[in-house]
Amino acid sequence: MLLNRLVDSVITVILVVTLVFVAMRILPGDPAVAALGDSATAEQLASFRERMGLNVPLWHQYLDFLVNIVTLNFGTSMITGENISAMLLANLPYTVELTVAAMIIGMIIGVPIGVLSAVKRGSFPDYIARIIALAGFCIPDFFLGALILIVFGLKLDLFPVTGGGTDFPSRMQHLVLPAMTLGLVMAAFTSRLTRSALLEVLKRDYIRTARAKGVTERWVIYKHALRNALIPVVTGFGIYILTMLSGSIAIELIFARPGVGSVLINGINSRDYPMVQAGLLVFALFVVVVNIAMDLLYVLIDPRLRRAAR
Amino acid sequence: MTQPVLEVNNLTTSFLINGRWKTVVHDVSFAIAPRETLAIVGESGSGKSVTALSIMGLNAAGRSRVGGSVKLQGKELLDLPQEAMRRIRGNEIAMIFQEPMTCLNPVLTIGSQIAESLILHRGISRREAEMETVRLLEKVRIPSAKARFDEYPHGFSGGMRQRVMIAMALACRPKLLIADEPTTALDVTIQAQILDLIKTLQNEEGMAVLFITHDMGVVAEIADRTVVMYRGDTVETGPTAQIFAAPKNAYTRTLLAAVPRLGSLAGISMPIRFPDIDRETGLPEKATQGVDTVSRGGKPVLEVKGLTTRFDIQGGMFRGIKGRIHAVQDLSFAIMPGETLALVGESGCGKSTTGRCIMRLTTALSGSVELDGVDLLSLDSRKLREQRKGIQMIFQDPYASLNPRMTVGEAIAEPMVVNGLQTPAQANAKVADLLQRVGLQAEMAKRYPHEFSGGQRQRVCIARALAVAPRVIVADESVSALDVSVKAQVVNLMMELQEKLKLAYLFISHDMAVVERISHRVAVMYLGEIVEIGPREEIFGNPQHPYTKKLLAAVPVADPAQRHRVRAISNDEIISPIRPVGYTPPARQYQQVSPGHSFMI
């Protein structure tokens, strides 16, 4: 089962890579011109193309491309001449820490609110929680980001507003506002998901069994119900993290954070083929890794899948 | 007289439904003595389960109201605060439920679910609780109990899960065990095991049992005294023997008259309808005579030869085939026009797969299914559609087999329209006719399925099957989900239609008593094979194969006099025919007992 997933993942990555390669080649505009400017001479352009391997046939470029990926050699930027692998490696931790922090915030806030909402269904706290969740859905993340930046960064001056920080304490400080932005949106999503999943589970027969055993209500919810409710929540989470990745691109721009998102956007703007290819590849791998992680998480939560996984 | 364990007086329960209080249990009173078993019997909606949940204080908070008095050993329970009531639940009163498949938490090990009660109520350490749990699992006769402590419910069969539920209920040695339809979802041989287990454990532990059921056969097996409920009211209370021998109330008589009794047709070769019952007196009217509907001498309308179906079991890293379920193995039988052949057996014996293969809803591996000489298994999809008009199916669950977004009229008209038999306009007239034919009213065509009761829905399903004027109907557990009185009516309807339309039925069922009523011939299936086939009278009167005998012996007898017979407790599980890849089934030999009656040796 796990092997199947891995094979699927490899196929997914190859497809994405191919798609990226094709998409970059059919885009209008000449990368050589983009890199060297309108004033470049014909010889300069020709030598640039030669250096970048743009003058060989497409299939040859594709093969080179694949070989480079496998050897993790993404080449150098067409524009700045920097080593792309090194650049990505420098930026990746920022994206990962943002995603992970947002996820943790989303869970820590979202799950308890969802539980409260389900248990006190129809009560005042439930309505408040649902309205907040609805607001979280309706406000676009870039708008919420800007709002948080203005209030907590500029007005209250609690946290730095731009950049990614250097040493650990400063990085954590720089992380707060962007992570809060994505985390709050995620919390809204998670609370709704948890609420509906828990309400569904609380109707099940085994919850009645637990109550008939004389288990306290709190124990019924946290031990008997919540773990079952987490199965659909994890599914939603997996899908949501992927949405959040694209959200992180906007957040990185707003807070001027380093990250794979900004690398990608810069690459697209300057038509920097190798850069965009590498950036997209990293995102594709991210998706694949998240999916596999979700599958493993399922198996952890739901014993019925363990036998199937073996 | 000793103090009763439980004393219920004028219990009244109401639910808040659409802003109004509706009383669903009305003034119910009874008492249970130590070591006594009291049965509450009634059909769906009689309020029997609500009564149990009211005693436990488990009705939905805020949306239910319980009045009257419930005393456990003299202590009033209804006045107790939530927390005090919680300490009684699972400790002094324990409960087991109908659906063993869904009553255990799928993400917790069975051991921890049992140990939980012990830790909670007895305050013992986890280690002690685990040791006690193993002892309890042994007590309910779960094989290799110790090894199974850490397993999850999905690895257990229905019967084994019910044993786990019982172990859980007995953990704190309750004074009262409430069993709410604990055997309804189980196969008949497993039901017998669980009933015996409850009886034995009751003797060992000395607890009182409140047993809730709709099955008079089970009542007769287990209960000292019986309370009959109807629409929230107690209609009759008394010793079980007395209720069976001389029922005072009309409804009790109706209920008893509708109970199919095994052996009631001994010495009669023809199927006979259930007697119609006078609703006023509850007495059966004159029994109808059996009518011979079978056309003998001609060719069979349905002939199945060598039908074999296997399902691959995949597993391992590369999803290889690890084994095969030999679901249906070399099955052969024939049905004459106007004849009913019953296919009986327990879960997993392949009887439903057989029905589905005949309908080509499941693909058979080999064999042939001839409908009037045309092999259905070899037809392409266009020709198959043509032939499907001749053979229709009725399913078990009348709730799930009707589309909730279609009126019943549309549902019945659809097969006629898609088969091009009628234009939509003509179909309407035909729908009205069909509805009347199955005992409903023509104007009901405009209604949606949720407006009908279970029995009415099954009638709608029958009307839908009849719409294309089939010659054969495959009825897969078609009356199993129905209440006993409704069951009798639907069985009667099927027999009446057979008489009028010369229908042939393949009646797939696990309910031996109903099978005895409806069928001309019976085929007993075990592990995908027919182990015995013959005329109904022969199979019931002179069974040969050990499995047939076992099946018949397990059926609860609706006779309280036989209550104290205790069978040897068996732990046999229903096995499934999983074979290794490359397994070749042995050639089977059949021995003929009398013309048409043979069994496997």
Image (tube, coloured by chain):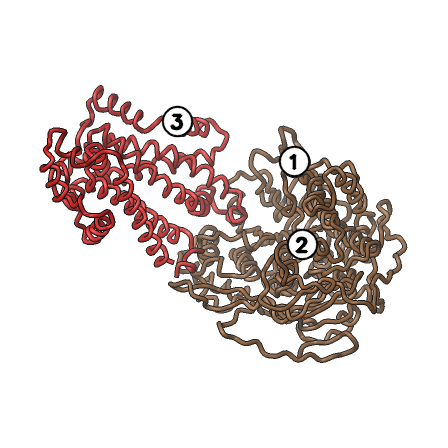
Q: Which residue is mark 1?
A: B14
Q: Quadrant of residue B366?
A: bottom right
Q: Position of residue B562 (x, y in %)?
A: 74, 66
Q: Which one is nearer the viewer's eye here, B135 or A22?
A: A22
Quadrant the N terminus of chain A occupies: bottom left
Indicate the chain on which mark 2 is placed.
B
Q: Quadrant of residue B370?
A: bottom right
Q: Secondary structure at mark 1?
A: strand
Q: Position of residue B546 (x, y in %)?
A: 67, 75
Residue A183 in the figure: left or right of residue B104: left
Q: Residue at x 47, y 61 (%)?
A: B133
**What amino acid type is highlighted by mark number 1?**
Ser
How far separated are the C-alphas under marks 1 and 3?
42 Å
For the colour brown, the matching chain is B
Q: Which residue is mark 3?
A: A138
Q: Are marks 2 and 3 on the same chain?
A: no
**What amino acid type is highlighted by mark number 3?**
Cys
Q: Are marks 1 and 3 on the same chain?
A: no
The reply to whether the C-beta atoms of the residues labelled 2 and 3 are less than 8 Å apart is no
The single residue placed furthest to the top in the displayed view is A155
**What amino acid type is highlighted by mark number 2?**
Ala
Q: Residue at x 64, y 65 (%)?
A: B189
Q: Position of residue B442 (x, y in %)?
A: 79, 38
Indicate the chain on which mark 1 is placed.
B
How far separated are the C-alphas under marks 1 and 2?
27 Å
Residue A158 in the figure: left or right of residue A11: left
Q: Position of residue B489 (x, y in %)?
A: 78, 51
- The answer to whether residue B541 is above or below residue B515 is below
Badge 3: few (under 14), some or many (20 or more) residues near its Cα, within 10 Å? few
Q: Are marks 1 and 2 on the same chain?
A: yes
